[in-house]
Amino acid sequence: MTEAFSSSKTALVNATMLIHPAHGAPIALTSDASDVAVGAVLEQLSSGSWQPLAFFSKQLRPAEKKYSTFDRELLGLYLAVKHFRYFLEGRRFAMFTDHKPLVGAMSKLSDPWTARQQRHLAHISEFSTDIRHISGKANVVADCFSRAAINNVVLGIDYKAMAEVQEHDEEIQALKTAITGLNLQSVQISNDGPKLLCDVSTGNPRPIVPKAYQRQVFEQFTILRTLAESQRLQGLVERFHRTLKAALKTRLKGPNWADELPWVKLGLRIVPKENLQVSCSELVYGEPLTLPGQFVDPNPTAFSTKVDPFRSLVKRLIPLPMSHHCTPQSTDQKSLKDARFVFIRRDGHRGPLQRPYDGPFKSFQQETRHFESWLEDGKR
């Protein structure tokens, strides 16, 4: 068997071995095209037979695959001449094709020719106009290079060799004595196959694959080992989303979070970055944004109804209280007696962008544990 393989390998190498160019020897260019690729072979006549000098093949693009048969054959001949220009320029040679309509393309007088066909024929005619026909059976080499590549043959798994590796693998042997949820048993894979150590805890035998066979098993089942999507892979984006979500949660009073989004984005753009000590607006415009409180007199007819909600929100904006970096005092009922404003907690289910408290509301009647205040809708 080894001798037969070596003889076939030697015969294949000798059949496709390229030869050196001979000065003055006749040369020929043979091309062919298929639905997926084009191929060509450059040959010279030596000792009464054509010997290969060089090969060429190229896969067609999606648009080129839609060409007609004539256009694909013409494209294959055009690309072959363009590829072997360094050898064909200034020399007499013949071009062979198995597509007969292409033979008379140079002498055809009838119109019309497409612009692409004219360009290809003009480029080919700069080198030679001698196009000859060859039968498809004789055009073996160019036809082979124009075909789709053969898929890689995936060999099967040698279960007998895997069973031997399982017996000598230290990790697998350690699993037999370890306290785990696995139920390890020797299961025969096929009728005449060897027994493999498998986990049968789920009801279906799952072979314990040694490390030496993991890659082969992955390739057998075409499982791509890629990292799962994690927030750590997009830390910068996720941190910005966390800040944006917290800002929306602070401002949101209803389900229309899109109405609050422009104000939240404006606030984030004017806040200085901790690592840069400069805001995004300063990086873009070179200076801080100026936010006028009342730039023009209010004119309801001059603005669309879409701007009215934003204008009312700007009028209700109040300065935020300053934060004191000190040890917070524990909540005391005595401190609540003098409170003029209160926040009302939202009980029940809250969405991810809903505020935990409503308010502040003015308190006008206070008791030990109860407050009465006016809400925005006029209710107590």
Image (cartoon, rainbow, N blue to C red):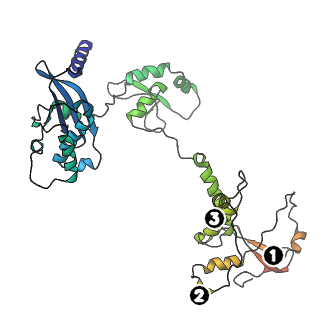
Which image quarter holds the N terminus?
top left
Residue 24 x/y as whole percent: 16, 22
Report the amino acid beneath label 1: Phe
State the count of labels.
3
Cα–Cα gap, marks 1 and 2:
36 Å
Q: Which residue is mark 1?
A: 341
Q: Element under label 3?
A: helix
Q: Is residue 352 left or right of residue 82?
A: right
* Marks 2, 3: nearer the viewer: 2
Which residue corresponds to the image point at 16% horizontal and 23% vertical from the top-left? 25
| Above or below: residue 128 compared with residue 329 | above
144 vs 317: above or below: above
Residue 301 has which mark? 2
Looking at the image, tell me whether mark 3 or mark 1 is earlier in sequence order.
Answer: 3
Q: Earlier in the sequence, mark 2 or mark 3?
A: 3
Is 190 on the left or on the right of 247, as rendered? Answer: left
Identify residue type, mark 2: Thr
Q: Compare residues 66 and 45 and report the one nearer the observer.
A: 45
